[in-house]
């Protein structure tokens, strides 16, 4: 499902921005014993080229396909552990919602391409912004090497992020606060539900607001209970929460919201010039935000599906 570049504008938010061989047969004597049993000679196998292995998630998160600086954030975002928690497999159809500068896209798209899966990037409406359009075109070019990537839209007025019941997994990273601020968070979760197959998975990572705080939808932080409630209103079943991306040092009360922390390191309000007198050292020491990591499922009996 292709859409013209009236989408993916969150990509303007950031700059756009290896394969390893498996242990060869015989390293533990396996190949030699097999040849002895079958009568295959060394001469017969000498000219056989070992099959190249597909890159694993571990390979890809440190691979050369990622833009400069992306891997530096692995220590905060734990991409391998996060994706494994969600249960990703290389042959899945996966929608990433509002992929921003492509931090996860440069892991997900090649992983799915080499495994026979499909990667769909669902961004937001570009509108009339020339900068946003240019950023989207750059993102399209960056994704061109990863097979047949599809581009769709999530916005207050969009029709859907993928054909109904077509996706195995929908993922979103640090975006729920944006939909809350835009007044269409419930619509977003409904779109995720519609796109997923019965039994499909929704994975959410979001900046976490302590439960004893009042939720205003500002500052980039959201209560975990609020995210669970949104998903359940859409029909999802909550499966499990993980502390993979937790950061107990984050107090979630910074002067410029979550953006005071790395990687934004904001020293003034949005749209204002950076404050050269602002001391960001303690925020650098905190690191990136404390984050919830939540896994949901669309019931296997949804949409009239029958249990096997």
Image: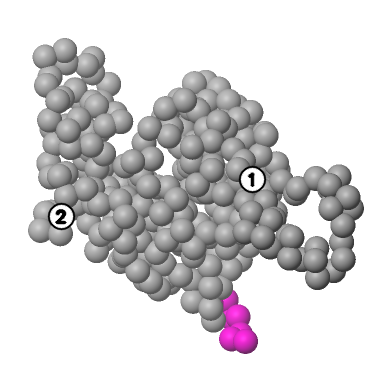
Q: Secondary structure at mark 2?
A: loop
Q: Position of residue 37 (x, y in %)?
A: 81, 70
Q: Position of residue 66 (x, y in %)?
A: 52, 32
Residue 303 shown in magenta: yes
For this rendering, which residue is in front, 212 or 280? 280
The residue pinned by badge 2 equals: 210
Residue 52 in the figure: left or right of residue 235? right
Query: Pointer 2: residues within 10 angstroms few (<14), some, or many (20+)?
Result: some
Please give the name of the residue rendered at 31% of the width and 47% of the height, measured from the top-left corner: 177
Q: Quadrant of the C terminus?
A: bottom right
Q: Please determine whether, in this image, residue 54 is positioned above or below residue 15.
A: below
Say how the picture is coloured.
one colour
* Closer to us: 110 or 160: 110
Residue 178 point in image, percent of width and height: 34, 44
Residue 175 screen position, x and y as percent: 37, 46
Q: Which mark is residue 226?
A: none
Circle 1 Cα neighbour tier, 10 Å, few/some/many (<14 / 14–19 / ≥20): few
Q: Residue shown at 69%/55% (left/top)?
A: 25
Mark 1 lies on a secondary structure that is: loop
Whichever of callouts 2 and 1 sits on the residue coming sooner in the sequence is 1
The residue segment tinted magenta is 302-308
The image shows residue 81, relative to residue 237, as above or below, that is above
Residue indicated by mark 1: 21
Answer with left or right where residue 47 lies relative to residue 189.
right
Q: Quadrant of residue 144?
A: top right
Taking the spot 42% from the left edge, 47% from the top edge, the residue there is 79
Q: Quadrant of residue 204?
A: bottom left
Question: Would residue 114 be counted in the magenta stretch?
Answer: no
């Amino acid at each position: 499902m292709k859409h013209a570049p009236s989408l993916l504008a969150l990509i303007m938010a950031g700059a756009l921005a290896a394969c390893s061989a498996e242990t060869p047969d015989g390293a533990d004597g396996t190949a030699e014993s097999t040849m002895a049993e079958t009568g295959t000679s060394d001469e017969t196998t000498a000219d056989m080229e070992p099959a190249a292995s597909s890159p694993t998630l571990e390979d890809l998160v440190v691979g050369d396909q990622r833009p400069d600086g992306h891997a530096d954030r692995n220590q905060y975002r734990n991409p391998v552990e996060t994706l494994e928690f969600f249960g990703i497999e290389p042959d899945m159809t996966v929608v990433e919602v509002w992929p921003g500068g492509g931090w996860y896209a440069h892991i997900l798209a090649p992983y799915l391409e080499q495994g026979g899966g499909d990667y769909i990037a669902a961004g937001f409406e570009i509108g009339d912004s020339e900068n946003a359009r240019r950023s989207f075109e750059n993102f399209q070019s960056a994704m061109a090497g990863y097979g047949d990537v599809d581009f769709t839209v999530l916005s207050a007025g969009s029709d859907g992020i993928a054909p109904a019941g077509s996706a195995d997994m929908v993922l979103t990273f640090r975006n729920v606060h944006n939909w809350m601020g835009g007044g269409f968070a419930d619509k977003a979760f409904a779109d995720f539900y519609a796109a997923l197959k019965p039994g499909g998975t929704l994975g959410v990572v979001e900046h976490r607001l302590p439960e004893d705080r009042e939720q205003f939808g500002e500052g980039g932080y959201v209560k975990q209970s609020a995210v669970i409630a949104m998903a359940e209103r859409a029909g999802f079943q909550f499966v499990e929460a993980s502390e993979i991306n937790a950061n107990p040092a984050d107090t979630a009360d910074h002067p410029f919201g979550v953006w005071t922390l790395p990687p934004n390191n904001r020293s003034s309000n949005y749209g204002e010039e950076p404050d050269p007198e602002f001391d960001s050292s303690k925020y650098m020491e905190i690191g990136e935000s404390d984050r919830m990591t939540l896994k949901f499922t669309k019931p296997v009996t949804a949409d009239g599906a029958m249990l096997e």
